[in-house]
Amino acid sequence: MKRRPQAYSFRMISTVWTSMLCLTILWLTVLTNTAGAAPGHEGEEALFTQLKSGKRMATEKNYTPAEKPTVYLTFDDGPSKLTPKVLDILRKEDVRATFFVLGEQVQERPNIAKRIVEDGHALGNHTYNHVYQELYSDFRVFWEQVQKTGNILQETTGVRPRFIRAPGGTYGNFDAFYFYYLGQAGYEIYDWTIDSEDARRPGMTADQIFRTVEKGPFGNEVIVLMHDGSGHDETVKALPRIIRLFKEKGYAFASLTPEVKPVQFSSGKPKWSRTETRESFDSLLAAAHEHRELWTSEDLPPGKDNALKALPSSSAAIAYAEAGQRGGPDRLNVHLGDRTLAFTKEQFRFRDDSYRVPLRPLIAAMGGTVEWNEERRTAVVRYGAIMAEYDLARQELRVRRPAPEWDAEAKTRIHPFPEMELANGTLYVPLRQTLELLGDRVLSSDVPYERGTEEVQAAVYGGYRTGWIFETNRRNPFAQV
Ligand SMILES: [Zn+2]
């Protein structure tokens, strides 16, 4: 499915409430397909009745369990003045975490939000103002606040988070409708497995916070709830000890990714009274489905119609593949904003101190799409406002992006790209060049180990970053990574 340009989607979101009535009819068809309910009006009615009874829809999504014990540290309610201290500690300890931020706070401290992303952490959406009464009286308000915060984050950091944490947690606050709408819109909802209780009552000391975390439970995947909102100085003090605790227990630290199975409390006895009508259900679901298109390209299974066709490997490709197996790290993790793309040794190439990765999963994880034109032996990438053509026949990459009117020549640039290689039907491209030529930014990468896992951090801007940034790398355009 073709990705809708994001700028257009934003307009759609803002006008969606007015166009919803018209869309409703159109989306009835989509609903029955997406929800897996029986086709037609009855299926929808049954779905509505089920949700109304409080019974949640089961998710069909598959998640990937962590290979080794992993802890996801999460910080809610920031960014505040304390957040840079938290970031300093995480940087020093070389630990990645997830920040569920408030839109309101991001507006006040956009630079701290940017730093969260630049430091390689994931962002989550914690609504705009955290006011329970508003958020839980009507799903519309919750939805509007999530959209508003998503837009603010997209503008300031280039990341639109797919993760949501309900202020106060979902227990007693979310009902089956909240879970369903947000799920249909493509969001993942995360509660936690360990509450540090740093916001449970005032006056919790660092020691008490640490002792609470120390009690566990310590499963294979642990999500720790902490707060970096103002007033949580004691959490900052406790943080190094908490990190040490998990390190001693042998846990790996990671940011949330959409592959992490969400932890969600059962809905519980609702604290709020809400009226849900069939009409509002239809319109909210329409809005959710409209929104889902923002992420659609990421969810596509490896292409059917436009798949890179398996071709007999050229001798160069075979030699290349063999060279790729020697030396270099065993695994490559590419952290793209909220998402992590993990490659095993067989899935990427390491040559001349540079990483070549399969184009399709990379672009999909960035939020774009790839089509293979067999006749022209060219992979066409659409990524936000950018179109890029990896022309295998000419060994060049042409990038077209929006340019100022007075500078028409800047619109398309052609780069020699001899490093790309087709092997067994997979097009491998240099990682760093691809990210940077498509407007993203490689923030950091470890020195390549002989063994072990290489972690590459990148900030992704969804194909809407303006201006050419390749100049920075001109001296040696094919420098490592
Ligand atoms: Zn909160």
Image (cartoon, rainbow, N blue to C red):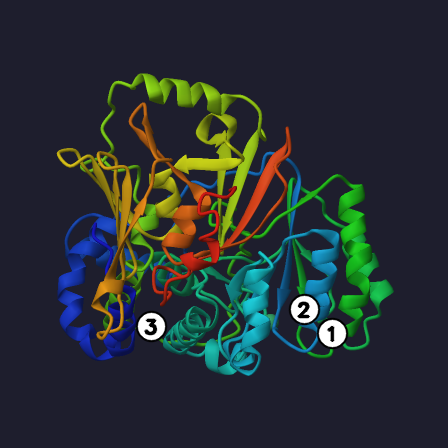
Mark 3 or mark 2, earlier in chain: 2
Which residue does the image show at 42% across and 36% down from the upper left? 357
Residue 59 appears in the rendering: no
State the mark number for residue 53.
Answer: none
Q: Which residue is under mark 3? A: 276
Instruction: Please tell me which of labels 1 and 3 falls first in the chain.
Output: 1
Sooner in the amino-acid sequence: mark 2 or mark 1 = 2
Residue density around tag 2, few if under 14, some if 14–19, many if 20 or more, within 10 Å: many
Name the kind of residue labelled 1 in the image.
His
Label 2, ligand 1: CB separation under 8 Å: yes
Specify whether 431 is left or right of 210. Answer: left
Residue under pointer 1? 232
Disc 2 marks a residue whose amino acid type is His
- Other residues around mark 3 within 10 Å, as few (<14) / some (14–19) / many (≥20): some
**Residue 390 seen:** yes
Label 1–label 3 contact, CB within 8 A: no
**Where does label 2 land, which residue?**
227
Q: Quadrant of ligand 1?
A: bottom right
Q: Nearer the viewer, residue 465 or 46?
A: 465
Q: Amino acid at mark 3?
A: Glu
Residue 318 percent across, percent down from the top left? 37, 18
Specify whether tag 1 is near ligand 1 (CB below 8 Å).
no
Q: Residues within 10 Å of mark 1 (few under 14, many from 20)?
A: many
